[in-house]
Image (cartoon, helix red, strand yellow):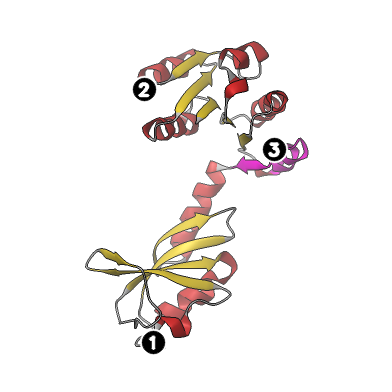
Amino acid sequence: MYVVIMGGGRVGLNLASFLISDGHDVTLIENDDNLCGNAAVELDALVICGNGTDTKTLEEANVKDADVFVAATGNDETNLLSCILVREYNIPKIIARVSNPDHEEAFIKVGIDDVISPELTAAGYLEKLITRPKVADLIVLGKGDAEILDIKVENKKVIGKRIGDISPTDDYIIVALYNNGDIIIPHSDMKLEEGNKISILVKTKSVKKITKLFTQ
C-alpha cells in the first residue's frame, strides 16, 4: 500500500514510522525545514520538503498513485485545503486530522468522512482510565461505538456461571479468557471463576452497566 502523509510533526512522523515498519511505502511532505530534515533522518522513506497545499508538491509525491492520503498537520485550514486538492486525484481513502472538533463538520461537507482528532482521542482515553478504575485496559473501536475491556471477575452474581448463560447479549460478548498469561477462546460451557481476567466486546453506551455486572 502506498501512503502519502502531509505533516512531519509528532502525529505524522509516528504514523509514517508505524506504516513503514508494517511494510508499506510512504512519502512524507513537510514544509518546515527542521522537521523535514528530522524526518529524512528518522524515516526510511521519501521525504519532500514542500507545501502539501501546492499541486506541484503533491504531484512530486506521486499522489495520483496513492492508496491513502493523510493530512496530519496541526493546522486544520491547511489540512482542509490539501484534502480538497487531493480529491481531484480520486484517491481511494483520504484521512484528515482535525485539532478543533468544531471544524469536523467543514471536512465532512467537502466529502472527507474519515476525520480524526488525536488530541480528543487521547483525552477521551485518559478520561476512561480515570472514570473506570475497574477496567484494566481498553481499546476503543470504530468511531467510539464499541470498546474491548479487560476486566477481573469479582462479582459473586456471575462467579460460577456458564459463559453461555450470560454471553452474548445485545450489549456485550465475552471474547477471551486468560489463564496464566495464555489466551483462551471461551466456549459456552466454560464457567467463570473468581479472579478470572476476561476481555469483553461491549457497546460504549453499556460500559458502565457491564463493568458493574462483573466487578461489583
Disc 1: which residue: 161
- Please name which of the two marks, 1 or 2, marks the residue nearer to the observer: 1
Mark drawn on residue 112: 3
Q: Check disc 2 and report its element: helix, strand or loop.
A: helix
The magenta segment = 102-116
- Please name which of the two marks, 2 or 3, marks the residue nearer to the observer: 3
Residue pictured at 53% horizontal, 55% vertical: 141
Question: What amino acid is found at the position of numbered circle 2 in the picture?
Answer: Glu
Relative to residue 127, is residue 169 depicted above or below? below
The Cα atoms of the two marked residues, 1 and 3, are separated by 47 Å
Q: Quadrant of residue 18?
A: top left
Residue pictured at 77% horizontal, 39% vertical: 109
Relative to residue 156, is residue 129 depicted above or below? above
Give the percent coordinates (x, y) of residue 7.
53, 25
The Cα atoms of the two marked residues, 2 and 3, are separated by 30 Å
Q: Check disc 1 and report its element: helix, strand or loop.
A: loop
Q: Earlier in the sequence, mark 1 or mark 3?
A: 3
